[in-house]
Amino acid sequence: MKAFEILLGYGCNEKCSFCSQELSWRAAPGLPLGLVVEQLVLAAKEGFDGVCFTGGEPTLRADLATMVACARRSGYRYIRVQTNGLRLARPEYARELVEAGANFFRVSIHGHTPELHDGLVKVPGALEKAERALENLRGLGAGIGINFVLNRANYRSLPDFCAHFLDRGQSNFVIIYPLFEGDLVAHEAEMSVGMGEVAPYVRAAFEVFRARKAPLPRLLNFTPCALPELRERMLSWSARSALIVDERGVPVDLYMASHDDRAKPAACRGCALDASCLGFKRSYLERFPAGLAPVAEGGAEEGPFAVGAEEIARALQPVPAQAAGASLLVERMKIRLDPARRALTEDRSQWSVAPHA
Ligand code: SF4
């Protein structure tokens, strides 16, 4: 699969203090429908067959179903919506998106009790709505995944969170270590937690999955030294780990975690994974400069070597932090995997368009 991620805009109906985007970015208008349609069609002609609509909250766009339908008509076989689930609590809206062609929904939920989830996203009733969204989508036969972003308020509850949703029939989870960007920077005192501190709770969560013989979750934004035995489940720690491959080794999904702005402390030179590991985000090392103990044993890295240096993913978004105005600055990023350099390379281009109101 070649994946195209389209960030429609930064507007959102939740207000998470651990968000990697800034509240002020919400002022900018979103991508206009005409541009999204044009870029969808162009990418399809270039062989892209997977698309993810994200934000912000993409369901705030009244024209989301139109875009989804365009994606289906253009030949995309995997059409994903990344959402907080609030609007999908309405059965008729969930049906509209599924009938338009959306076949996978990744729902962000950060607590298994209303106190926790509603408090974190600052919307009363948010958990109840997200759970109704899951029910609606399941009834419609759509694929569902749950994203859980760790923070100081919720990390100890992770095993209970996983048990709660496994018991309700969910089986596809991504556990995300937060990025020290956006609003999280303004709320570090109450939200920040180190990888070393969360590691025992992630291990305990994996035991919950093993006890139920459920598919193990994926881990995003971790370095292997935090949880060496779970490296195979980690995304974004090496160039190849961005890709999820199926049993035949064919790429089936790609996580657009940023691979830039990484750094390695001196201790990494003694790590068995130094050659393939991209290191910590610089913003993490500024806060936790000691890093973690290097990994003693590596082993050959497995991955889709055959992909070559071709373009494997593309992203389109409004440039962050721009005020509302007569024109909107848009950025397109083409991502190539270069196995020889063990790197994802990113070509960026920017241009102005008339904004979506
Ligand atoms: S190379 Fe450094 S960051 Fe990567 S796993 Fe080893 S110690 Fe951790």
Image: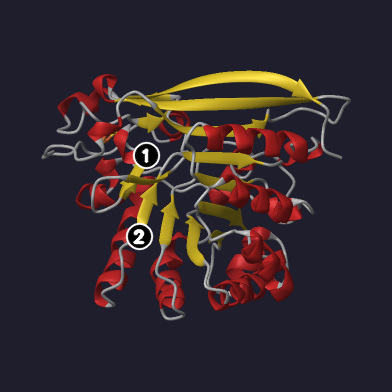
| Way the structure is coloured | secondary structure
| 175 vs 50: above or below | below
Foreground residue among 70 and 342:
70
Q: Secondary structure at mark 2?
A: loop
Q: Secondary structure at mark 1?
A: helix
Neighbourhood count class around disc 2 (C-alpha, 10 Å): few under 14, some 14–19, many 20 upward? many
The amino acid marked with disc number 2 is Pro
- Of pointers 2 and 1, the one earlier in the residue sequence: 2
Which residue is found at the position 54% from the left and 38% from the top? 44
Q: Position of residue 238 (x, y in %)?
A: 31, 34
Which residue is found at the position 35% from the left and 41% from the top? 243
Residue under pointer 1: 242
Ligand 1 - quadrant of the structure image: top left
| 347 vs 115: above or below | above
Quadrant of the rendering where the N terminus is positioned: top left
Residue under pointer 2: 217
- Marks 2 and 1, how far apart at CA: 15 Å
Q: Position of residue 294 (x, y in %)?
A: 20, 36
